[in-house]
Image (cartoon, rainbow, N blue to C red):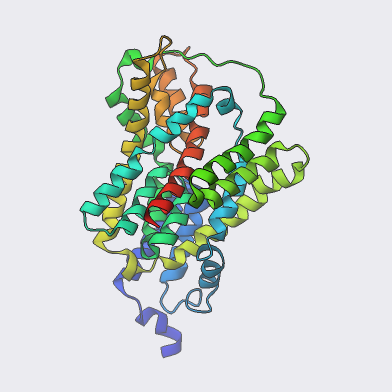
């Protein structure tokens, strides 16, 4: 009887709560389509982890084996960067290289949150792991948290991906608060035409060299991202490019999500510290958005042809959600205002900025 009903008798209230959290994540992934490729594996993995006496966890459990192979070694986040790099077309950014500046300005939330987390009692490395939520880049958040604060990895990863999914809810109120109706109706030109293929090939190599020389700690992050983009743009590896965008990214994302869930045990996750991390993560997203918008308004002080300051909000790494949000906001103010391509230019710059910011955190705190 003990062997048959041992699982029921061993239930603790924390495990029940975590199973409910897992079900909520599954609901959000399926019904609300919030980052389903990651929240669904995390949600189901949370259930597997919190079933009493679960054979899925433990020293030889499959979830622990996956965690040791892909998270502890930092392999899964880096492989996902290859897939992300293969998906991104940097053409809009190459037509407007100055848009890369917004990718730096919109990282303000990382450093504000780092300071806030330190004031709330987290040590400096834990604060860095929490602050990187503001990069709005899930793999970067996981990479840094795994390096600096493994005990915070579950909360940091769930917060990062949850807030990325909530960009359409978080960003519009902040943008409206910081801009006038007249500013939101500013039209921006986009120059048609393509970028020479040689420039597209040189770009990922040049970014890797420049970022690597100035911020060596970012080499793994930026290098794998740009390697994926080089596969896309070189023109001789079309099969590999499609595989990186689809099979590689999808399979590794499944493994990443379900192995992160192996750390989401009730006793470790259900702490006041977790709620603080979620609040600080929201703070990071708000300040990221504000930093980009205010930077655009600052540039307008010196420009004859004004920028629509809303595009500054796209400097976060949540690609392409943030660009879509800004374009839709522009359309609501003026149906003939087409901001999608300028917003995409800033958004892809934000992808680079977030990765370099992650490297800076690793360099400064490591």
Q: As drawn, is 92 to the left or to the right of 48? A: right
Q: Is 134 above or below relative to 46? A: above
Q: Residue 106 occupies which quadrant of the picture?
A: top left
Judge by depth and name the residue closer to the eye, 17 or 85.
Answer: 85
Task: Please say whether residue 48 is visible from this viewpoint.
Answer: yes
- How many dots with numbers? 0
**Residue found farthest to the right:** 236
Image coords of residue 70 (percent x, y): 55, 63
Residue located farthest toward the front when viewing the structure as drawn: 213
State the residue at coordinates (50%, 17%): 338
Side (left or right) of 188 relative to 273: right
Query: Which residue is at 34% across, 58% downward?
Result: 125
Quarter residue 199 falls in: top right
The quadrant of the image that shows the C terminus is bottom left
Q: Vertical placement of 15 versus 325: above or below? A: below
Image coords of residue 153 (percent x, y): 40, 60
Q: x, y (%) of residue 248?
A: 65, 52
Residues 350 and 264: in front is 350
- Residue sitting at x 39%, y 41%: 166
Question: In what quadrant of the picture does the N terminus appear?
Answer: bottom left
Residue 318 visible here: no
């Amino acid at each position: 009887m003990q062997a048959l009903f041992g699982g029921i008798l061993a239930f603790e209230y924390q495990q029940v709560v975590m199973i409910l959290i897992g079900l909520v994540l599954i609901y959000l992934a399926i019904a609300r389509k919030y980052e389903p490729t990651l929240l669904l594996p995390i949600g189901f993995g949370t259930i597997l982890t919190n079933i009493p006496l679960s054979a899925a966890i433990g020293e030889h459990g499959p979830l622990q084996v996956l965690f040791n192979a892909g998270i502890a070694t930092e392999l899964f986040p880096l492989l996902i960067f290859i897939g992300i790099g293969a998906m991104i077309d940097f053409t809009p950014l190459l037509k407007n290289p100055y848009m890369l500046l917004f990718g730096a300005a919109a990282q303000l939330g990382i450093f504000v949150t780092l300071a806030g987390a330190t004031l709330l009692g987290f040590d400096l490395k834990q604060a860095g792991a929490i602050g990187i939520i503001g990069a709005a880049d899930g793999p970067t958040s996981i990479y840094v948290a795994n390096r600096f604060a493994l005990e915070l990895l579950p909360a940091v990863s769930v917060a990062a991906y949850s807030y990325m999914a909530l960009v359409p809810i978080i960003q519009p109120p902040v943008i409206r608060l910081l801009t006038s109706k007249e500013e939101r109706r500013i039209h921006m030109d986009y120059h048609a035409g393509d970028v020479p293929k040689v420039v597209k090939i040189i770009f990922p190599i040049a970014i890797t060299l420049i970022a690597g020389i100035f911020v060596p700690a970012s080499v793994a992050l930026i290098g794998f991202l740009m390697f994926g983009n080089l596969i896309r743009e070189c023109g001789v590896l079309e099969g590999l490019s499609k595989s990186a965008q689809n099979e590689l990214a999808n399979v590794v994302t499944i493994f990443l999500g379900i192995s992160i869930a192996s750390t989401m045990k009730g006793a470790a996750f259900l702490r006041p510290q977790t709620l603080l991390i979620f609040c600080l993560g929201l703070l990071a997203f708000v300040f990221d958005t504000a930093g980009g918008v205010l930077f655009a308004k600052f540039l307008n002080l010196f420009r004859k042809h004004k920028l629509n300051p809303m595009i500054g909000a796209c400097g976060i790494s949540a690609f392409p959600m943030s660009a879509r949000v800004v374009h839709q906001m522009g359309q609501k103010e003026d149906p003939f205002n087409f901001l999608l391509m300028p917003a995409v230019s800033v958004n892809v710059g934000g992808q680079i900025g977030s990765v370099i910011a992650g490297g800076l955190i690793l360099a400064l705190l490591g």
